[in-house]
Image (cartoon, rainbow, N blue to C red):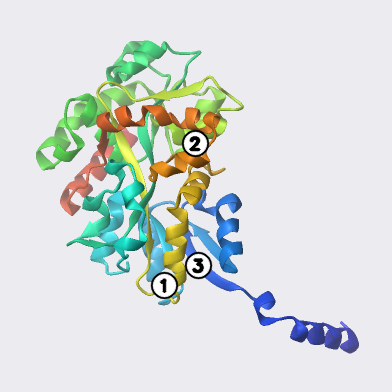
Amino acid sequence: MKKTARAAILLATALVPVSAQAAQELNALIWCDHGDPALLEPFEKAHDVKVNIKEYQGTAEALTILEQSRPGDWDVMVIDAVDVGRAVDRGILAPLPADALPTADFFPELVMESHNSRDSVIYAVTDKFGYNTIAYDKTKVEPADMASLKALWSEKYAGRIGLYDYYLPMLGLVGIAQGVPTSALGAEKIETLRDPLMALKKNTKLVADVVGSQTALATGEVDILLGGGEFLTATLHAENPNLDWTIPTEGAALWAQSLAVLKDSGQPELALEFVKYVTSPEGQARLATSSCYWGMPANAKAGEHLSAEQKAVLRWDEQAEYLKRAQLYPIPSAEDDAAMQDLWTDMLQN
């Protein structure tokens, strides 16, 4: 580059106001739904901030990222509600002021104090939820059969089933099918799931992650997906309205994700503003219909910002009944968690 051109650029840069040169930055460890520009851009414009995002797949990966980062590198994180306690134990989350959170407007079941709080101190807030349940192609199965988890052990659907590859909700679903509540999945009960799990595996064509599961159901590789739900089918609804999901009579596993401020955040006030925005009715409606995957917003007032069609896809009017039948993920001890992972691995290898 010529010296004169370079000097002109430097001069022009110097004349640009500081606020235009570099807005504030907020660094967020997220799941993919929080990376949708439709969610982030209103916050960025309102606060003159750039939200830098890094997507991760599981809590272990997020904790590794944090361990390898410097204090202050990250400001907020999305975390599986069932794992908030692990993060609290590691001392990485900042307390959140109760009066700054709109939890009074939440579906009562989604306040989840048992997950998001410790000793009456709030460390995270639920921002989205849904169900690991039965998703299916209603043109290839008898929808009435999907009213019971027992149908998945039937020879009628052998070789036509996919399993979502996440041991916690899946073992929870196997337990629910056997009449074992997720809250009772302790050491004595885990091994009782072995035989029904192995029997289910015999009926299974594949076990896959979220993307693989969604692809298998969308392409017809499988007709039923155990562990699926609205988070898999909603984004495909326009292209393939034959994909459906239901909560069987025995129940389903309720997934929930939480949002937290990291203790070492360099700008905790801005981080709290982000939490307040995402859990506001407007932010919740945008998060619920994220281009990555849909899910129910924890804030019931988000319904005022969703269209009738969007609410129909989310089964908005059925949530009261669904929540009665849903069970939270198991929260195993370290020893029980290892036993559950071992059982799931045994299933995968057989």
- The dot on residue 333 is none
* Residues at marks 1 and 3, CA–CA distance in whole angstroms: 11 Å
- Local secondary structure at mark 2: helix
- The dot on residue 268 is 1
Q: Residues within 10 Å of mark 3 (few under 14, many from 20)?
A: many
- In-image side of 277 versus 253 (left or right): right
In front here: 336 or 312? 312
Q: Residues within 10 Å of mark 1 (few under 14, many from 20)?
A: some
Quarter containing the C terminus: top left
- Check disc 3 and give the amino acid type: Asn
Asked whether residue 215 appears in the rendered view, the answer is no
- In-image side of 346 versus 286 (left or right): left
Q: Is residue 236 above or below residue 68?
A: above
- Check disc 1 and give the amino acid type: Pro
Q: Which residue is mark 3?
A: 27
Report x, y in % for residue 156: 36, 10
- In-image side of 195 versus 224 (left or right): left
Q: Quadrant of residue 198?
A: top left
Q: Is residue 313 above or below residue 183?
A: above
**Residue at 17% across / 47% down in the picture?**
336
Q: Which residue is mark 2?
A: 212
Q: Residues within 10 Å of mark 2 (few under 14, many from 20)?
A: some
Q: Earlier in the sequence, mark 3 or mark 2?
A: 3
Report how many numbered discs are placed on residues in the image. 3
Q: Is residue 228 above or below residue 301?
A: above
Q: Earlier in the sequence, mark 1 or mark 3?
A: 3
* Residues at marks 1 and 2, CA–CA distance in whole angstroms: 37 Å
- In-image side of 213 versus 120 (left or right): right
